[in-house]
Structure formats: C-alpha cells, structure tokens
Image (cartoon, rainbow, N blue to C red):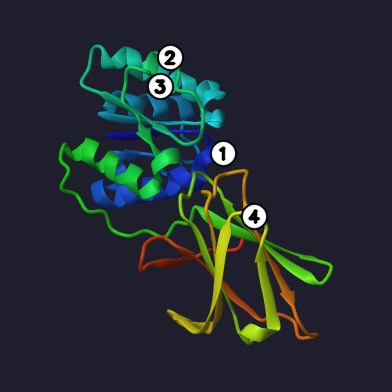
Amino acid sequence: MIFLSHNKLDKAVVEPIAIRLSNLYGQDNVFYDSWSIQPGDGIIDKMNEGLSKCEFFFFFVSVNSLSSKMVTMEWQNTIMRSAQADVKLIPIRLDGSIMPTILLQTLYIDLFQNGIEVAFKQMVDVINGTNTFHEASYSFSNLGFKFQQKDDSYIFTVEALHYMEPMSKYLLIFDNPLKDLDVKIESSMFQSNSFEDVKFGGLQGNGWYVAVYDATVPGFPVKISVTPKSDIKPNFRAILHQVSEEKWQIIPPINSFSI
C-alpha cells in the first residue's frame, strides 16, 4: 500500500501525483483520501486501515501539513511503526518549509526545488527499487497567468503556483501585426524579441518573446505589459513557457478575462 499523507490545501499538487500512481499501481494500492474514504466511512477506521497496510508512506511537507494535527498524527505514528515493521517513510518537500528535526536524518524528495516530474520519478524509483522507469506525460502546469487592464496597457502576470521555475522564458502570441503592439517586461535584466507567423499546435499568430534572467518563484511573478500603438485592441491567443530548447507549454489562465 502506498500512503499519501498531505493537507487538503496542497491537493493541487498532490492529486495529479496520486492519479499517476493509481494508474501505475492500481487505485486500491494507493491510499489517497479523496477515493479511499467515501461518504459513510469512519475516517479514523479508514486511516488506520491504510496505515496498517502501508509499505511506502509519502509525507508531503509544507506549511499547511506541518500545522495539521491529523497529518502530524499520521507521520509520527508511521515513524513509530517503521521501527517494528517493514514500512518506509519518505518526506516530500512542497515549499520552503524546514523539515521536522526527527526527519532530518531521512533523505527527502525536494519537489519545491526540482519540480513535479523529477519528484514523481523519484517516488516511482523508491517504490520499484529501480531507476529504469520512464514516466508517462501528464497534464499539469506549475505556472499560471493573470490578466488585468491598466490605463492603456494590458498586464499579463505569470506566476509560479507551487514551486520554482528556473527558466523564465515566455512567448506571447497575438493575431496583431508586430508593429501594432509594444511589449515590455517589468525587470531590469531581460531580453526580448518578436517573431512573425508563429505556429504551435492549433495556434497561429505573431509572437513576442521575453526572457528574464531570474527564476520565476512563488510570490515573485513576472509581469509583462502589452500596449497597443493604435486604437486596435490586442487579439490575444496564448502565453507559452519554454521548458527546453525545443519544447514549449501553454500556460493556463488563473482568472477569467476577455480583451
């Protein structure tokens, strides 16, 4: 049994991992409260059942989980049980929280520093006892963007929602001609460029590329200002994030908007 100990406020990160694990090992072999505890079940009874069958206990460490009495009870009981049974406790750091002292001797998985894909592969490696697994792709975005209009400009704010993104390279795509828009970024250290006739999947338009030399981290977003040079409004298509030399991903919006 794989037990995922977490706080409900961290489900945005934990649930995609839980689903991927269930696809690999079967839902019955992954204790995740959203499907392991159903209406009418005794919560404590189900928790005890999951913990008693647990072989791999993944503790998602965050400000939220460290302040949760229920989560604290889970991981502390698992430490006591690990001294008598064949159960392995693996902490996973979700934010900048300091690891509890009693867990400092345990090598933890650092999702906050390394990202969800690296963390997930390390989890699978622990479960399988091998380093040969290659994970399937799964739709998840650590980045999101917000939109607001300020005077004559349109502000696109790209945010890291859960962990640091080391590469702050973005491409905004519009239908407008390049000469009709002025795109700037609120940073002293950046580079920019523009490209005609950008194609990505079903998207097509003109692209404005901006790259900040700093990482995009939670609480420190990247703000991009788009100002029309005429009375014609920008016809926005998408914002892309460069994740490797030849790979881009669409960044989903955080808030609903229209231009």
Q: Secondary structure at mark 1?
A: helix
Circles 2 and 3 in contact, beta carbons < 8 Å: no
Nearest to the eye among marks 4 and 2: give it: 4
Q: Quadrant of the C terminus?
A: bottom right
For the residues labelled 3 and 1, the Cα–Cα distance comes to 17 Å
Report the residue at 45% width, 22% height from top. 99
Task: Residue 150 in the image: state x and y as whole percent.
Answer: 81, 65
Q: Secondary structure at mark 4?
A: loop
Nearest to the eye among marks 3 and 4: give it: 4
Nearest to the eye among marks 1 and 4: give it: 4
Q: Is residue 198 above or below residue 70?
A: below
The quadrant where residue 179 appears: bottom right
For the residues labelled 2 and 1, the Cα–Cα distance comes to 23 Å
In this view, the residue in front, 46 or 183, is 183
Residue 209 appears in view:
no
For the residues labelled 3 and 4, the Cα–Cα distance comes to 42 Å
Residue 200 appears in view:
yes
The residue carrying pointer 3 sits among few (fewer than 14), some (14 to 19) or many (20 or more) residues within 10 Å by Cα, namely many
Q: Amino acid at mark 2?
A: Thr
Q: Amino acid at mark 4?
A: Ser
Task: Residue 163 in the image: state x and y as whole percent.
Answer: 49, 44
Residue highlighted by disc 3: 75
Residue highlighted by disc 4: 187
Q: Secondary structure at mark 2?
A: helix
Nearest to the eye among marks 2 and 1: give it: 2
Q: Amino acid at mark 1?
A: Leu
Q: Is residue 95 above or below residue 200?
A: above
